[in-house]
Every structure is written in structure tokens, then in C-alpha cells.
Amino acid sequence: MALQRSRYQNAQKTFIELLDLGVIPIVNENDTLAVSEIKFGDNDTLSAITAAMLHADLLFLMTDVDCLYDKNPRTNPDAKPIEVVEDIGILQADGVCPHDSP
């Protein structure tokens, strides 16, 4: 566990130093190069971990989905858009990764 914590802290220090230098780091999990030890599953998960690591105020995810839905609109035709999120605690992720889709 200490090794993982050390890696986390090293990554955190690297990001902070880059930001202090005015560099905007671009983080991308490239599936063709990722190895199982450092694979997160998708860029959304990796971006959330990175945002939390840096105590970011905001995280913007770019997607081809036009809004937030109560269900996955690709697999549930009855999915309804969520216009306002009053309590983030009630949201549930469907756990579907783009790699898992047919």
C-alpha cells in the first residue's frame, strides 16, 4: 500500500509543479499503451481521480451525449434528461464503460 501512496503523491507533486509552471497537463489513458498495473478503465475515471488528486474546483467532461440522463440513453429509450442536480448523492452511475459496449 505504501508504494501506491508514494506513486499517488509523486503524481500529485508532478501535476502541481506543472500547473505552477503554467503548463496545462493533458492526461489520457491510451488503451494501446496502458498496462494492467496503471490501467483505470476509461478517461472519465482517470479524469475524476486526477481532479480529486488536485482538489480541483470543477471537472468538465466532454462527451457526445447531449445532457445528463437518469439512465443510459443508448440502452434505455425511456431515459429522461436531468435538468438540475439538487443532490449529487442520489445519482447512480450505470457502470458501463465504452469499451464494454458492443
Image (cartoon, helix red, strand yellow):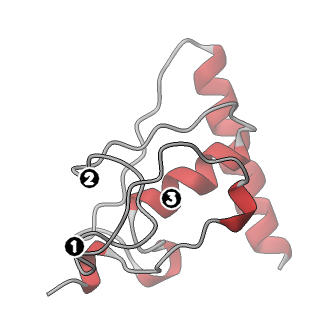
Quadrant (top left/top right/bottom left/bottom right) for the N terminus: bottom right
Coordinates of residue 14 in the picture (x, y in percent): 64, 37
Coordinates of residue 43 in the picture (x, y in percent): 40, 58
> Count the marks: how many?
3
Q: Secondary structure at mark 3?
A: helix
Disc number placed over residue 74 in the picture, else none: 1
- Which mark is first along the chain, 2 or 3? 3
In the image, what residue occupies the spot 79% across and 61% down?
6
Residue marked by disc 2? 65
Q: Residue furthest right?
A: 2
- Which mark is first along the chain, 1 or 2? 2
Q: CA distance from mark 3 to mark 1?
A: 22 Å
As shown in the figure, which amino acid type bears the numbered disc 1?
Arg
Look at the picture and state if 91 lies above or below 49: below
As shown in the figure, which amino acid type bears the numbered disc 3?
Leu
As shown in the figure, which amino acid type bears the numbered disc 2?
Val
Q: Secondary structure at mark 1?
A: loop
Look at the picture and state if 30 lies above or below 86: below
Quarter of the image holding residue 8?
bottom right
Q: How many C-alpha atoms fall within 10 Å of the one at disc 3: few (<14), some, or many (≥20)? A: some
Q: How many C-alpha atoms fall within 10 Å of the one at disc 2: few (<14), some, or many (≥20)? A: few
